[in-house]
């Protein structure tokens, strides 16, 4: 309808009185106005005017409906125009940005900001209800509920809500290749883990494991954290629903090792696990948990070198299984005593170990016909290493427990052992006694043949030396017996620990006592003061060292004229003084450790222990290497320098070794002459009296 026609019809309506007075206003106002996308034509205006008594009601209804319609939905671009802290490109690349607008999560935002009140933080559970339910029952959520604010939340693993990527994206924090790194962001933090009573060593252990190395090499089929622990519902190992709960471990490992799991479950260990036996081993008991390594790795608990001692022996060596299930113990020591065990300890990697005979995952008792050690299968089992082995070859025991085994072979071995131990005692003991008798006679004859007129040690010095000798040897034996309880000297002593400790302390008191007396002797006695003066180092000692070495190497023709105490005696003497003070100080500190700990920190005692031990090694080796040479092994004095016994030394030997000490030589000659005269006089008097 054209505009002139509209005017004409409007005039007609007015003429007949049908038009409402306000119709003119609506006609003019609604012309060309768009409501809900529909343009009102002039025909609609005429109809409203024609039915004037209804059109106002209709118009009001229409306007109300238009006002109640929702506003247009905000776009993400609208939000990001203000919220520039969110990277637009990162958000668009994320899984949320590629699927949703901001207001799909921030549902309480109806229009542009500022937002008052502040919007409520969106909850992941509004879309991910199942995952949230699983998380709530897991370890991390329970830790947060108990007050641990450091426990992992959604964003700690998946990333911020505006940057989350799907797990299939290699850049996602929960992609398989990144799982270990994501978990390590918390679990490698030693301080964080220690605060909750856990260790951060598991991360390093996984990185060094066969799984961690395979993943690092690009093998995405290798196990990662979530394969064993789960994803959202991570549970502690003591929870029966946890995949790492002891009885669930075989099924967890079976995700990758299905055939091995089936073989294991049919073994004696798997059957015990199926019955609920906590003491039976599962995969992790033998292979480890995070630190699983291939059997070719020498440090792996299932390697040939480690299997008997580190893995099988942990259960089969003690008596626990014997007491509860009748399983024989002492399997490790009896294996170690066999040829196989000795060769393994010697470094052999091909000699038979536990798995060679019993199997790996298919271990069964010898009573089971399927067992590798069933009587009917022994020829084949032994034949793997011993081609041609027959039925008689396998009629023997590998684990020969000498005191306990009662079979024919073990009994024969036991009696053979007894026979030879007795034979060794009689034959070698007889040889030793025979040679000792001969040695004694020759040593005394050599002693008598010498002109032993030089006094090397007076009586007081010999007594001090004897106490020092006995206390030192006792301290060495009883001290190292504590450090090395399985050593031969510990077995020779055969002392209970409390007795050993008492003997060690008595010897220590004796050493300290003779040391204190010696200090008094050096000051109070004339001979002691002279000894101290002769023991003081002088510059000539340094030149004597080089001169002596040069002489015995043939570089010099003349041997240095050493004084009463040469550089060797002086070095040993002052080393003895120093060592006695060190051992006495540290020994008393360890004896009265509680009292010492009232004054000094505990680590002082640890340092004292180390000093006491290594000073003991130094002193013992010094006596064996240095002192024993001069008094025993030196060809000029062998078999012994008897000065420790009677204080005297051969004059020719003394002149050779101490040519610079003319005073002692002259005094010795004078004493010898005087004693000779006295003997002659006594002999004459005896002859006269006899006549």
Image (spheres, rainbow, N blue to C red):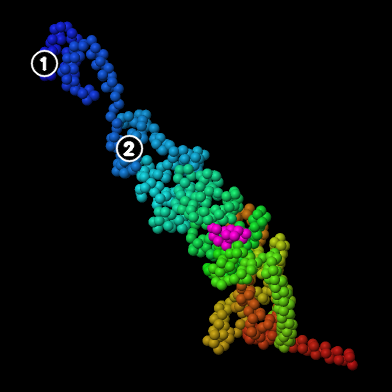
Q: Position of residue 232 (x, y in %)?
A: 45, 43
CA gap between label 1 and label 2 equals 52 Å
- Give the left or right position of residue 109, taking residue 502 as reference: left
Element type where label 1 sits in the image: helix
Up-down relation of residue 208 to residue 433 (above or below): above
Q: Position of residue 430 (x, y in %)?
A: 73, 80
Dot 2 crowding, Cα within 10 Å, few <14, some 14–19, many 20+: few
Up-down relation of residue 286 to residue 239 (above or below): below
- Give the left or right position of residue 210, taking residue 578 as reference: left
- The residue depicted at 57 percent of the width and 50 percent of the height is 274
Q: Position of residue 83 (x, y in %)?
A: 31, 37
Element type where label 2 sits in the image: loop
Which residue is denoted by mark 1 in the rendering?
5
Q: Position of residue 67 (x, y in %)?
A: 28, 22
Quadrant of residue 105 in the image? top left
- The residue depicted at 52 percent of the width and 63 percent of the height is 303
Residue 367 magenta: yes
- The residue depicted at 49 percent of the width and 52 percent of the height is 253
Say which quadrant the N terminus sits in: top left
**Residue 685 versus residue 197: which sits nearer the camera?**
197
> Which labelled disc corresponds to residue 484?
none
Quadrant of residue 31 in the image? top left
> Which labelled disc corresponds to residue 100?
2
Region in magenta: 358-372
Residue 586 visible in rendering: no
**Mostly what secondary structure, the magenta segment?**
loop
Number of the front mark, 1 or 2: 1
Up-down relation of residue 90 to residue 355 (above or below): above
Point out the tag, 1 or 2, that comes first from the N-terminus: 1
**Residue 677 versus residue 594: which sits nearer the camera?**
594
Up-down relation of residue 309 to residue 104 (above or below): below
């Amino acid at each position: 309808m054209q505009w002139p026609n509209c005017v004409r019809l409007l005039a007609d309506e007015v003429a007949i009185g049908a038009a409402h007075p306000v119709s003119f206003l609506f006609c003019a106002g609604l012309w060309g106005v768009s409501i809900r996308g529909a343009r009102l034509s002039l025909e609609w205006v005429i109809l409203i005017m024609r039915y004037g008594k209804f059109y106002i009601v209709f118009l009001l209804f229409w306007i109300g409906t238009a006002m109640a319609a929702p506003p247009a939905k905000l776009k993400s671009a609208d939000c990001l125009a203000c919220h520039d802290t969110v990277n637009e490109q990162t958000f668009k690349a994320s899984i949320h940005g590629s699927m949703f607008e901001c207001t799909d999560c921030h549902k309480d935002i109806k229009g542009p900001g500022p937002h008052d009140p502040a919007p409520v933080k969106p909850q992941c559970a509004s879309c991910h209800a199942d995952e949230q339910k699983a998380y709530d029952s897991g370890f991390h959520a329970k830790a947060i509920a108990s007050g641990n604010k450091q426990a992992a939340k959604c964003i700690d693993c998946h990333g911020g809500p505006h940057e989350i990527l799907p797990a299939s994206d290699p850049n996602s924090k929960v992609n398989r290749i990144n799982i270990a790194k994501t978990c390590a962001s918390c679990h490698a933090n030693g301080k964080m883990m220690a605060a909750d009573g856990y260790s951060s060593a598991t991360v390093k252990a996984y990185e060094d494991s066969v799984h961690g190395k395979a993943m690092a090499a690009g093998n995405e089929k290798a196990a990662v954290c979530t394969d064993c622990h789960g994803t959202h519902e991570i549970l502690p190992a003591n929870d029966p629903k946890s995949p790492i709960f002891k009885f669930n471990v075989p099924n967890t490992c079976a995700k990758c090792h299905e055939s091995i799991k089936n073989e294991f479950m049919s073994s004696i260990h798997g059957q015990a696990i199926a019955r609920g036996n906590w003491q039976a081993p599962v995969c992790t008991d033998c292979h480890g948990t995070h630190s699983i390594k291939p059997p070719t790795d020498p440090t792996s608990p299932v390697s040939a070198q480690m299997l008997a001692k580190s893995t099988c022996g942990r259960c089969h060596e003690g008596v626990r299984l014997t007491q509860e299930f009748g399983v024989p113990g002492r399997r490790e020591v009896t294996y170690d005593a066999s040829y196989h065990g000795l060769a393994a300890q010697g470094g052999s990697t091909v000699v038979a170990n536990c798995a060679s005979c019993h199997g790996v995952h298919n271990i069964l008792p010898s009573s089971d016909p399927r067992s590798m050690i069933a009587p009917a299968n022994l020829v084949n089992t032994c034949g793997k290493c011993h081609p041609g082995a027959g039925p008689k070859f396998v009629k023997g025991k590998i684990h020969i427990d000498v005191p306990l085994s009662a079979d024919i072979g073990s009994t024969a071995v036991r009696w053979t052992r007894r026979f030879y131990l007795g034979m060794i005692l009689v034959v070698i003991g007889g040889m030793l006694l025979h040679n000792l008798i001969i040695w004694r006679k020759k040593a005394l004859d050599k002693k008598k043949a010498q002109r032993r007129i030089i006094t090397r040690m007076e009586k007081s010095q010999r007594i001090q030396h004897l106490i020092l000798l006995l206390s030192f040897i006792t301290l060495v034996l009883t001290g190292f017996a504590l450090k090395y309880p399985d050593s031969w000297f510990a077995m020779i002593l055969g002392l209970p620990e409390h007795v050993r400790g008492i003997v060690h302390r008595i010897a220590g008191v004796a050493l300290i006592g003779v040391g204190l007396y010696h200090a008094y002797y050096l000051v109070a006695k004339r001979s002691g003061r002279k000894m101290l003066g002769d023991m003081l180092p002088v510059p000539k000692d340094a030149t004597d060292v080089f001169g002596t070495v040069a002489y015995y190497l043939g570089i010099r023709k003349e041997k240095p004229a050493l004084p009463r105490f040469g550089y060797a005696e002086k070095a040993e003497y002052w080393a003895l003084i120093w060592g006695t003070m060190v051992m006495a100080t540290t020994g008393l500190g360890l004896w009265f450790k509680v009292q010492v700990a009232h004054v000094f920190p505990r680590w002082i005692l640890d340092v004292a222990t180390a000093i006491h031990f290594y000073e003991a090694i130094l002193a013992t080796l010094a006596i064996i290497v240095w002192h024993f040479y001069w008094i025993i092994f030196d060809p000029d004095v062998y078999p012994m320098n008897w000065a420790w016994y009677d204080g005297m030394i051969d004059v020719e030997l003394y002149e050779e070794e101490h040519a610079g000490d003319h005073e002692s030589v002259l005094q010795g000659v004078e004493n010898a002459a005087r004693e000779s005269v006295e003997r002659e006089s006594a002999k004459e008097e005896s002859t006269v009296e006899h006549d």
